[in-house]
Amino acid sequence: MAAKKSKRAKAGDRVKDAAVEYFAARSHDAWRRTLLKTSPEQKGQPRMRMRGGVMVDVNQPWSKLHAKAKRDNMRAAADAYDAVRKFPDDREAAANFVHQRWIDRNKGDKSQPKALFKPYAKLPEVEKDKDRVHVDVMQRALRAVQKAPSSPARKPAKAAPRRVAVEIDASAWRKLEAAAAKLSKTLGRPVAPDVLLRAGIDAVTALSAAVIAEERARK
């Protein structure tokens, strides 16, 4: 039972990690496209913000974004993930949760407008929509990462070697032991009867294959 719970937890962690990465990268790049569309003069210009105790340029594509800025985006994505998991069927409750987490993350950032720190219910619709978008994007992220990729065709497992039991009567076994003893004396090293038996079977098998091949060649 504990092992099953552990496997489910690990699977849940993988889904969360993938969804958070998906959300963070796409949300940041979408924000940057909007910024450059509405303020084209910002292209190529640094947009410095305090992230993780250092000033970093957030006007960079996700692939080039400073690690501390990425971490901030990932935190926002994780908050959106928690919101969707906590309120899977209530968009407004999830958006309110997202906003509360935003306040917690940004309360020390003096560059943020004070009006944004109002309770969700008192925000103008345009600001509420930003929180709703977080909910919507995370739901898309979860759908995207939970789509199971087609499993590559597995190679058929190799069949286990076939084992055949061979019955030998006492008389035949005594003859085999005598032959093994004679061969041991000739070679100067011990040869067990069962080794001699396997060698005999291999020889007979090889001879049978040769005879069959010859018969086929004659047809």
Image (tube, helix red, strand yellow):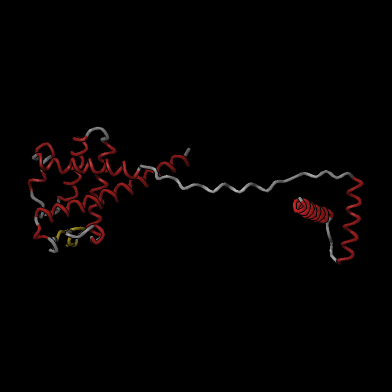
What x and y, as percent, mark residue 182? 91, 60
Does residue 4 lie above or below 113 as drawn?
above
Res 82 quadrant in image: top left
Q: Nearer the viewer, residue 92 or 187?
A: 187
Number of numbered tags placed on the structure image: 0
Looking at this rendering, what residue extends furthest in the front direction? 219
Residue at (27% x, 40% y) in the render? 139
Residue 106, compared with residue 67, is above or below; it is above
* Picture coordinates of residue 169, whole percent (x, y): 88, 44
Rendering quarter of residue 46: bottom left
Quadrant location of residue 109? bottom left
- Residue 149 visible: yes
Please provide percent x and percent y for residue 205: 78, 52
Residue at left offset 77%, top offset 44%: 165
Side of 92 relative to 141 (left or right): left
Residue 184 image point, x, y percent: 87, 62
Q: Which of 117 and 158 is in front in this view?
A: 158
- Viewer-side residue, 180 vs 43: 43
Is 156 on the left-hand or right-hand side of 133? right
* Front one among 165 and 47: 165
Query: Which residue lies at the image location 49% right of the left edge and 47% below the top edge?
Result: 153
Question: Looking at the image, which residue sits at the far top?
Answer: 89
Position of 146 compared to 176: left or right?
A: left
**Residue 205 visible in the current orientation:** no
Q: Residue at x 12, y 40 (%)?
A: 119
Q: In this view, does 57 lie to the left or right of 168?
A: left
